[in-house]
Image (tube, helix red, strand yellow):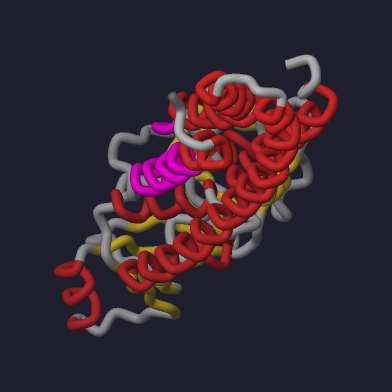
Amino acid sequence: MKAMIPSLALYFYVLVMGFVVWNIIFKSLVYPYQCEYWHITEIDYSNVIESSNDYESFTRLKKLDNIITFTNSQGKRMNENVYVFNVMGLYEELDLREDEMAVSAKMAEKLDLSIGSVVVADYPIYDQPIKYSVKVILPFASDLYNSINNQDFSYVIVGDDGVLENQAKGTMVYFLSSNEYEEYLSDEYSYINKYDMSDEKESLERQLLIRWISVAAIMMIMVIAIAILMHIEINKEVLKYYYDGYAISAVKCFDIADHLIFFGVPVLLQIVYMCINKNVIYSDGFFICIVAMLVIGALITIFVGGHKYGKAA
């Protein structure tokens, strides 16, 4: 074991750090799209319509035309799509006062917010920033619709102070079921834009699949490359014992033990990390796929090469 440490410690370190970097890449490139997809599969509206007119018979929220900058107590900022709360809003359970807001989990993560956190908003129509207290944390998303084009932002719903609803420039956004959507169009109500959430779901699926395949390929290329280099180094050392006349069974045990310690341990740590975070950041299919590849790859790496020493007695 002492003889192997100088040559394998670097590979061990690189493999561990490679997993750390990969987890960071996954969290930044895949996880947001995965959360967007989870959100869009749970919504109860199939179509969204933007209109300059207010029709009271449909579920709606006023969306401000301007992206608004929000700042947390530590001075960290994020730009948000802002909706103004009303009684016919999308989330019927909400009851926001004028100094309260409901924030997307995306905003909560970016600005380290929790229930009761104080956030400051800079509106163009006010001379002074407006303070809000976070009352509810809503599902993770960049926006309630058209999220693909809003990846740099998130969304909030703020309590109405009478000014935002009546004086701030904005658009009425209607969140409709398929039947409501047909009713809206059949009555020839005006609209600026209309969105089919099934199209957005398909777009997110494509983006997510591309990112899943890309990050999985990155991991497997890294693991295979390090496994090959580590395997070569281990066999260089273990072959010495084989040529020195050690029993074949003992030599094979040396080979397997080295692979288990220097390669198997980092792989096991990564699998444990993924299991702990499975319900938070990984989808079931992706989790099973990656863990299966890691386990199969580790087993192949650990037990391959035994033929070099003949058959164990």
Q: Confirm whether residue 95 shows in the render.
A: yes
Q: Main secondary structure of the magenta part?
A: helix
| The one of 175 and 5 positioned closer to us in this rendering | 5
Q: Residue at horizontal 39%, vertical 32%?
A: 279
The image shows residue 109 at horizontal and vertical percentages of: 60, 35
Residue 148: where, in percent of width, then height? 52, 65
Q: Picture quarter containing residue 173?
A: bottom left
| Magenta extent | 278-297
> Can you tell which quarter of the image residue 243 is in?
top right
Task: Give the residue at x 66% y 49%.
Answer: 222
Give the residue at x 35% y 48%.
285
> Residue reaching furthest right?
6
Q: Position of residue 77 (x, y in %)?
A: 74, 41
Residue 219 in the image, given as x and y percentages of width and height:
60, 49
As drawn, 40 above or below 239? below
Nearest the camera: 309 or 163? 309
- The answer to whether 140 appears left or right of 88 in the picture is right
Judging depth in this view, the residue of 74 and 186 nearest the camera is: 74
Residue 287 highlighted magenta (yes or no): yes
The residue positioned 78% from the left and 46% from the top of the image is 127
Residue 1: in magenta span: no
In this view, 48 is above or below 22: below
Can residue 167 be seen in the rendering of this structure?
no
